[in-house]
Amino acid sequence: MRVSEKENYSSSKKLDLDNSFIPALQHFLYEANGVYALTLDIGGNVISDLDTDTEEESAFIKKHVPIANMQEVAGNIENNFVEELISVPTESEYVVSEAVVLRLDGIPKGVMIITGVISDSIKDAEIPEKIKLIELNEYERVVELSVKVLSEYLTSSANEQKAELLLNEMQQDSLKLEEDYVRSALITDIVQMLESEKDIVKIVEDVFKMVCEYLDIDVADLYRINSDNVTVSVISEWAADSKYACMEREQDIPIENYPFFKGENFIISSNTDLKKEQRDFLDKEGIKAYIVFPITLKSEIIMYLAFKCINKERVFQYESVRFISDVRKILQSIITKRVAQNSLTSSLSSLEEILSSMECSIIVIDPITRNLLFANDVFDKDLSNELKKIRLADFFEHGELVVEYHVKALNRWLEIRQKTIAWVDGRAVELYTIYDITKNKIYEYNIEKSTNVDSLTGLFNRMRCEQDLQVYVNLAKENKENGAIVFIDLDDFKHINDGLGHQYGDILLKAIGTNLRHIRGIENTCYRVGGDEFLIIITGKAYEEINPILQRVEDLFSHPWQLRGGEYFCTASAGVCRFPLDAESPSDAIRKADIALSEAKRSGKNKIVFYDSETNYNEVKRLDMEKALRNACVHPEEEFEVYYQPIIDVTEQGEKCIGAEALVRWNSPELGRLKPGDFIPLAEDLGLITLIGDYVLREACTACKRWNDMGNPDFKVNVNFSVVQLLQNDMKDRILEVLRDTGLEPKNLTLEVTESLAINDITYMKSLLGNIKKSGVKVALDDFGTGYSSLNHIHEMPIDIIKVDRCFVRDVGKDEYSQTFVRMVTELAKVMDMNVCVEGVEEKTQLDIVKESKVDMIQGFYFAEPMPYDEFELKFINR
């Protein structure tokens, strides 16, 4: 059977779960671990039922974990691309059940429900003797192991299935391409018969032989309408077996005996519905499938072509019918030429009509003048224009039969074949058949890529990244185009791993990989190159959309991730290097993207930075700063100085200074005076922030205690704490130790934490800040409005003060949103029994508008910039 009549395999076919592995794993879990497993698809249908020794066990499990509960969980996972494990409600406290989500290529396909009867929780319940029991910690271990086993299996299964599907489709396309070539070659051979001097009957017989052997047809006949116009005779015939021949007996037969000789085309497959007289005719002649085409001369029917399948049933496909139609046109041209000798114009017109119907591109060139004699319009305009720029004969100078050519401008691949034929006027010409094989090349490329994936995320791995980047950099240079790599590193991913466990860290990495791959333009150029590092290549037409692509990457990390039943934020920093603009080799591009990434980390994280010469300078500067910072932390009191900025109470007349925010400055002998934003991120990366933070805390508490003793017992000091400091296990004890050593009342110390830090791990921060508050220390939420928190989260946190970020004050009076935001936060803070401090007030107009919102405190350059201890005391402390 020909390719076009075979089953069509497609890579769009859905990937399916392996029904052999799932039951085997369930059996192992039952026999070796004493748990019960059942697998459902997302529609709630059972893929693999419970594996038990007795019906009693099966009934017991389904009673305590109703199938409806399992189906509800299965039905809710279709759009769940994050969670690996979901709890299934049970009817008894001593029966626990977890659903492991089964994903193929990131798409949820079903759940394996793993149920355990917990021996620790049974108490007085009556349990059938056959029921297997398991301790809770052992059950949890089994579930965790199952998650890992299923994840590895599903990743491997998806890769194998994709590879198999791609290979099948590539093989089908390859066979289709081969078939197109064979058909084209046959048409070429038949066309040459236009100039044959053989007898017309012999020519037709030769054509019949080629067509029937190619299409596996049993008989072909050419019927001539006799001069009486009422009878027909077979004048040329080819039969696969002499027993099928009818030429001798079908002479001078009344045309009315042939119900298909009606002046129309008939394509009769074995399953075609027919009129009674038509069906009777075919049955009488023993014909199972039949094609009839009339041949005309000057609009008058003079003959009929008939192709008959006798040996077996046949359903004709489109390609077969079109091929026979093309043959009919050639035969009609040959017959017409014999009737009207020397009618060159007629022959050429017919030939052009035939060649124009071919699926491949046909080009005919005079080998001497190089003039183009004919070209059909198969390819699109862009590809046709590119073909005009090349000299086809150059490809075949060394006797090649077939060549492959890459059209770089369009990134398309062509297969070109050459043959010398006789043209309609008798001269030898070059006939070129050209096939677009881009799809085959893409399939080959995808097959190769499927062996280079990261087993956890399904993205390509580092090795594949380096190989691909080499190709893309070379192409960009050759085509004089631009590309870019984006080096992504998750911010503080260690806290997710340490706080929730590596299992949930893996879940987060998978979710990030899936979401990156769904961004248009980079679907096939995303890589996981390290533990929490990803790399994206943007090239070709996608480079024109680099800014929207980067925006979608930023948006991806602007929302919380669903982990362990709660919302957790994990932002990312990224560095971008363009090639060949900034780098001409893959290694240089990666190095410079890494430099830009470091700059993003240093400048506050959660941002994307492009590499430039300034970035490179900053990297060198960073190394110098790192050395100086390490030296400074040996004796922090020698180079670090605490500055103070007043906090003003605007609820009463007089705008009294009621406190100060302590801000560190670094007086480096090598680098000069530096502000916190210049060195704090580096100190966090180097693990030096705790030393600096401890120094600032002690200095600030000492100063505040002095000011309290000078007749200002309620004067307070605010100290900023970084994420690294707050994650120290002994943070509370260290704060209390400083308070004891300095004698400062806890109520006069305010701990400032940033909004993004406070809600990154709400459970941990609630516990930590709650314990600190119990000691009397107050807590302020800094930079409010710049992060991702909801008011619900703020309400949950043990917070005393909300500090509205300066960005909302900058445009107050001009931007209605900023003014409304400040007023709304103030009103809601009052409801939640919190105070509000607005930062960044620099002008009288801003002050008046902010005061209208009934805020409690204001901070900004309007009152004073941060200043040294002595200067602050002289200006703001009442003696």
Image: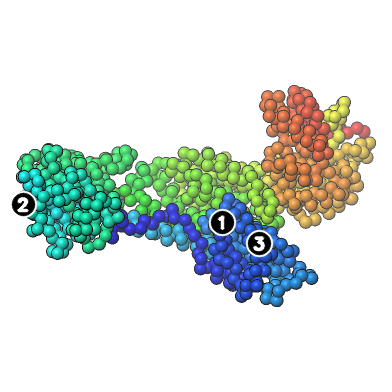
Residue 594's place in the image compared with 29, above or below, is above
Picture quadrant where residue 87 is located: bottom right
Give how far apart the Cα atoms at labels 1 and 2 are.
69 Å
Q: Which residue is mark 1?
A: 42
Picture quadrant where residue 599 is located: top right
The residue that appears at 80% across and 46% down in the rendered structure is 798
Q: Is residue 356 left or right of residue 169?
A: left
Q: Earlier in the sequence, mark 2 or mark 3?
A: 3
Residue type highlighted by circle 2: Asp
Mark 1 near mark 2, Cβ–Cβ under 8 Å? Answer: no
Image coords of residue 135 (percent x, y) = 72, 70
Q: Quick one: label 1, few (<14), some, or many (20+) residues within 10 Å?
A: many
User: Where is the C terminus found, in terms of image quarters?
Assistant: top right
Label drawn at residue 417: none
Q: Earlier in the sequence, mark 1 or mark 2?
A: 1
Label drawn at residue 66: 3
Image coords of residue 360 (percent x, y) = 27, 47
Using the image as rendered, state which of residue 398 and residue 34 is in the foreground. 34
Residue type highlighted by circle 3: Pro
The residue that appears at 72% across and 69% down in the rendered structure is 118
Q: Is residue 550 left or right of residue 492?
A: left
Q: Earlier in the sequence, mark 3 or mark 1?
A: 1
Q: Quick one: label 2, few (<14), some, or many (20+) residues within 10 Å?
A: few
Label drawn at residue 199: 2
Q: Please name which of the two marks, 2 or 3, marks the residue nearer to the observer.
A: 3
Give how far apart the Cα atoms at labels 3 and 1 are.
17 Å
Residue 330 shows up from this direction: no
Using the image as rendered, state which of residue 558 and residue 189 is in the foreground. 189
Residue 396's place in the image compared with 142, above or below, is above
Residue type highlighted by circle 1: Ile
Q: Please name which of the two marks, 3 or 1, marks the residue nearer to the observer.
A: 3
Q: Is residue 579 left or right of residue 853?
A: left
